[in-house]
Amino acid sequence: MPQLTLYTRANCHLCDEAKEQLDALRAEIPFDLRLVDIDSDPDLRAQFTHDVPVLFLDDRKIAKHRLDRTRLRRQLQRTTVRR
């Protein structure tokens, strides 16, 4: 199953939008989702503070700021077929 990691923070409207889109997409395509609060780790905060939300598929960054749901669906479908 594909592993998505969403780097996020509290009080971030783009992060909330990304979570909603991912929840809706998960109804169509199964994947594991890990949410990581960048403010809980100084290194992550330094790395992503101006970029959240940031989405990784396995170990590859595939989106930041806004998600393209159509593109993400295609990426997940390709990943699911390969596994």
Image (cartoon, helix red, strand yellow):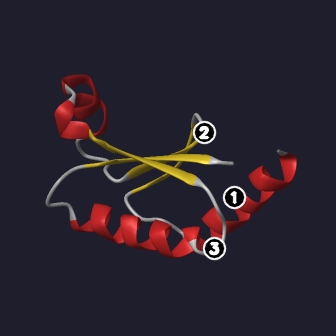
For the residues labelled 2 and 1, say whether their Cβ atoms are less than 8 Å apart: no
In which image quadrant can residue 36 be found? top left
Query: Which label sits in the foreground, 2 or 3?
Result: 2
Residue at the spot 76% in from the left edge and 50% down from the top edge: 79
Question: Badge 1 is on which residue?
Answer: 76
Q: CA distance from mark 1 to mark 3?
A: 10 Å
Mark 2 burial class by Cα count in 10 Å: few <14, some 14-19, many 20+: few
What label sits on residue 58 in the rendered view? 2
Q: Amino acid at mark 1?
A: Leu
| Residue 72 vs residue 19, the one in the foreground | 19
The local secondary structure at tag 2 comes to loop
Instruction: Answer above or below: position of 23 versus 12.
Output: below
Residue placed at 19% from the left, 33% from the top?
Answer: 40
Q: Which residue is mark 3?
A: 70
Q: Earlier in the sequence, mark 2 or mark 3?
A: 2
Quadrant of the frame with the C terminus? top right
Where's residue 9, x and y in %?
22, 50
**Helix, strand or loop at mark 1:** helix
Front residue (pair 3, 13): 3
The image position of residue 48, as x and y in percent, is 30, 39
Of 20 and 51, the residue lying toward us? 20
Report if the CB atoms under discs 2 and 3 are less than 8 Å apart. no
Q: Tag 1: Cα neighbours inside 10 Å, few (<14), some, or many (≥20)?
A: many
Quick one: label 1 or label 3, which is nearer the N terminus? 3
Residue beneath the point at 28% across and 30% down: 44
CA gap between label 2 and label 1 equals 11 Å
The amino acid type of the residue labelled 2 equals: Asp
